[in-house]
Image (cartoon, rainbow, N blue to C red):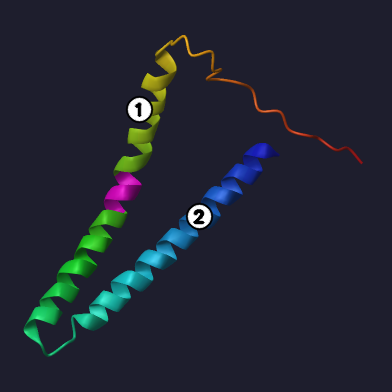
Amino acid sequence: MLTKKILLGALTALSLILVLNFVLVAGFTVLAQSSFKSNADMGVLTALIIFIALVVNFLFLPPLLMLLDKSENNISGSSGVAVNAPIKENITTA
């Protein structure tokens, strides 16, 4: 049940990120239609950078986070903080 909630939350966040980036790219593409050359160039460049950032974010961020999490779990410190503490969930039965 907890996994289902986590996946639903991740998919919701993913859809919001995609919509936000689509709106930003569309807005700067409209700016690219300007007859003023500087504005048009800035619109094209900004829309392209936002799109590339979205692609790079989805391709490189998850493996990087998994790599950092793996190396963080291997470090044993004396801080007294439990790194892999189990998550307790209240389960209600009907």
Identity of the amino acid at label 1? Leu
- In terms of image quadrants, where is residue 68? top left
Please give the residue where the numbered disc 1 appears in the rendered image.
67
Please give the residue where the numbered disc 2 appears in the rendered image.
13
Q: Nearer the viewer, residue 8 or 39?
A: 39
Which structural element holds mark 1? helix
Q: Position of residue 19 (x, y in %)?
A: 43, 67
Q: Quadrant of the N terminus?
A: top right
Q: Earlier in the sequence, mark 1 or mark 2?
A: 2
Which structural element holds mark 2? helix
Left or right placement of residue 4 versus residue 64 in this view: right
Left or right placement of residue 67 versus residue 39 in this view: right
Q: Residue at x 43, y 59 (%)?
A: 17
Q: Residue at x 10, y 87 (%)?
A: 36
Looking at the image, do the residues carrying marks 1 and 2 touch, with CB atoms under 8 Å apart? no
User: What's the distance in space between the residues labelled 1 and 2, CA to CA?
Assistant: 22 Å
Q: Residue furthest right?
A: 94
Which residues make up the magenta segment?
55-59
On whether residue 94 falls in the magenta region, the answer is no
